Image (cartoon, helix red, strand yellow):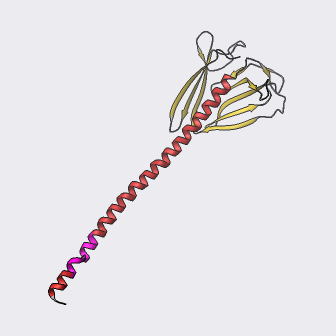
Amino acid sequence: MSPSASARARGKGFTLLELLVALVIFALVSAMAYAGLARLVEVRRTLAAEQERLGQLLFAMALFERDWRSMLSRPVRDGSGARQAALLGGASAVEWTLLIPEPGGGASVSRVAYRLEGGEWVVERFPFADRAFASPRYRERLLAGISRLEFRYLDHEGRWRREWPAGDDRLPRALELGLSLEGLGELRRVLAVEGLR
């Protein structure tokens, strides 16, 4: 092979140095792309978890409000036969009588209670308003990670109270629900009683 042919052959290929530089550049670009992709996957995972948590909160609030709108101003008897007000409320728990429409027409009367237990918002359902000693109850965890669940009751003089009933059998004018949820902050909701049965 003549020297000019060998120079032409070298001119068509890459030198070892050029290949090493190209590989280093490719490795840097790949590392940057991988880091960006890993960050994108992490952000997506975080957003999915927050979206699920927000969905749980919205479901719990919708269930609470649905039950609240079904409230019935009817006192009940507890397991020992003692009379209880239509609405019994404390600072972190509330219980009331509700009217449940039946699929074929008519309605039944039951009881529901919402409370904070060990950082969880829990609902208990009693299928019968007037309970016997061993009446069944159905308990469901609505939401975890709650640092504070608080109820207040607006009396007929316009004062907020931490306990209900406040001396008579009337329902309060409104209920305020305060809730602190880890990662989502604080939520306050006021629900009126007017128009309820």
Q: Position of residue 45 (x, y in %)?
A: 50, 49
Quadrant hosting residue 6 = bottom left
Residue 126 in view of the camera: yes
Give the position of the N terminus as an image quadrant: bottom left
Quadrant hosting residue 100 = top right
Q: Residue at coordinates 56% horizontally, 42% vertically from top-left? A: 52
**In the image, is 89 to the left or to the right of 5?**
right
In this view, which residue lies farthest toward the bottom?
A: 1
Q: Main secondary structure of the magenta part?
A: helix
Q: Residue at coordinates 54% horizontally, 32% vertically from top-left? A: 180
**In the image, is 173 to the left or to the right of 54?**
right
Segment colored magenta: 9-21
Give the position of the C terminus as an image quadrant: top right
Q: Position of residue 134 (x, y in %)?
A: 84, 33
**In the image, is 114 to the left or to the right of 42?**
right
Q: Is residue 7 above or below residue 35?
A: below
As for residue 19 lying within the magenta part, the answer is: yes
Q: Is residue 170 above or below residue 36?
A: above
Report the front residue among 4 and 100. Answer: 4
Report the front residue among 106 and 164. Answer: 106
As for residue 87 lying within the magenta part, the answer is: no
